[in-house]
Amino acid sequence: MKCPFCRTDNDRVIDSRASEEGFAIRRRRECLGCKRRYTTYERLEEMAIKVVKKDGSRVDFEPEKIRHGLQKACWKRPVSEAVLEGIVSAVEGRIYEKLDSEVESRDIGEMVMEELARIDQVAYVRFASVYREFKDVSDFVDELQPMLDRRRREEG
């Protein structure tokens, strides 16, 4: 592993531990050249999963796209990066559990919305508005109605 600071290919592992619910190993390393420390992650090489988009086209599954959508939905919301990473890991884990070579984009969106609904209702609605392509205010009301009904039952 080349040091990201001095580019020397000589380091030692200081600490190793499971990360991302056991899907990765986090290694803390020290460069023997410049003595600086850095972190690397080791992951299994996973099978290539294709995402079937709404138009029928197929693209490679990229967890980064989920992360990007979550960051937009949670912008200026009290949701930490660690929580977002947890959502990405949970969705990614569910996708790989299926052991299918393809997954529908609609299924990925539903998984993300299930996770967001438990964490932040505003972020959930933001994500849903883009994912479900709301056309007008009535689409928002239709999405919010089950949440409002559930809250009334809990309070009442």
Image (tube, rainbow, N blue to C red):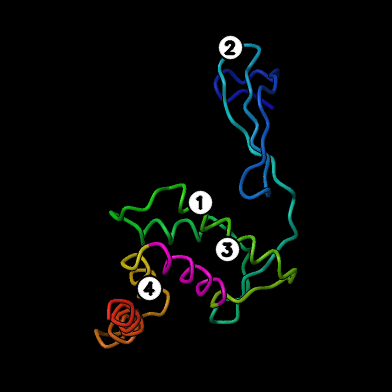
Query: Which of marks 4 and 2 precedes in the sequence?
Result: 2
Q: Which residue is mark 3?
A: 91
Magenta part of the chain: 107-119
Q: Which numbered mark, 4 or 1, is in the foreground of this view? A: 1
Q: Quadrant of residue 130?
A: bottom left
Q: Which part of the image, by quadrant, shows the C terminus?
A: bottom left
Determine the secondary structure under disc 4: helix
Q: Residues within 10 Å of mark 4 (few under 14, many from 20)?
A: few
Horizontal relation, residue 54 to residue 102: left or right: left
Query: Which of marks 1 and 2 precedes in the sequence?
Result: 2
Residue at the spot x=40%, y=62% of the render? 119
- Give the residue type at disc 4: Val
Determine the secondary structure under disc 2: loop
Q: CA distance from mark 2 to mark 4?
A: 47 Å
Horizontal relation, residue 49 to residue 68: left or right: right
Q: Which residue is mark 2?
A: 34
Q: Which numbered mark, 2 or 1, is in the foreground of this view? A: 1
Residue at the spot x=34%, y=72% of the render? 125
Q: Quadrant of residue 5?
A: top right
Q: Residues within 10 Å of mark 3 (few under 14, many from 20)?
A: many
Q: Which residue is mark 4?
A: 130
